Image: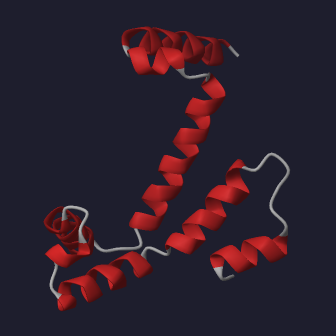
Amino acid sequence: MASSGLGIQAAGKIAQRVPVLRALPVVELLMWGEVAILAKQHLERLTQPERRRLVELVKQAKGRPKNLSVSERDELSALVQKAEPRMFLADCAEKLSPVGVPEAVSRRIGGR
C-alpha cells in the first residue's frame, strides 16, 4: 500500500511542474493514457519501415491529399488500413465506455 501512496505523491509533483496536467482531472489523464496505449498497439501492426514511410507520406501531404501522387495516396491508404483504424475506434469505445459497448455495435464499428 505504501508504494501506491508514493505513486500518487509523485504524480502530484509531476502535475505541479507541468501546467497542462494541473488543469486535467486524473480520470481524464487515465483515459488519455488508455487511448495512447491503444494507439501504440495499433501502430505496432506496422513494421518499423512502414511506420517511417507513413510519417514521411503524412509530412509530405501537409494535410492535402493533392500533395501526394496517386501511387503515394494508395500507399498511404494501404498503410493506414493495415493499422486498422476502425478496430482502434471499437477498442477505444470498448475501453472507455462506462457501460460497455453492445457486441453488435462493436462488430459494426470494428468489423469483428
Q: Position of residue 14 (x, y in %)?
A: 43, 15
Rendered residue at 82%/76% (across/down): 104
Tell me where residue 108 sits by quadrant: bottom right
Residue closest to the eye, 103 or 14? 103
In the rendered image, the vertical position of residue 38 relative to residue 42, given as above or below: above
Quadrant position of the N terminus in the picture: top right
Residue closest to the eye, 69 or 7? 69
Counting every numbered tag in the picture gives 0
Quadrant position of the C terminus in the picture: bottom right
Rendered residue at 60%/35% (across/down): 30
Q: Position of residue 86 (x, y in %)?
A: 56, 73
Rendered residue at 74%/71% (across/down): 106
Tell me where residue 24 sits by quadrant: top right
Horizontal relation, residue 17 to residue 65: left or right: right
In the rendered image, the vertical position of residue 104 relative to residue 15, given as above or below: below
Rendered residue at 25%/70% (across/down): 54
According to the image, what is the colour scheme of the structure? secondary structure
In the rendered image, the vertical position of residue 14 relative to residue 76, given as above or below: above
Residue closest to the eye, 87 or 58? 58
Q: Position of residue 9 (x, y in %)?
A: 55, 9
Horizontal relation, residue 110 to residue 39: left or right: right
Q: Position of residue 4 (x, y in %)?
A: 64, 18
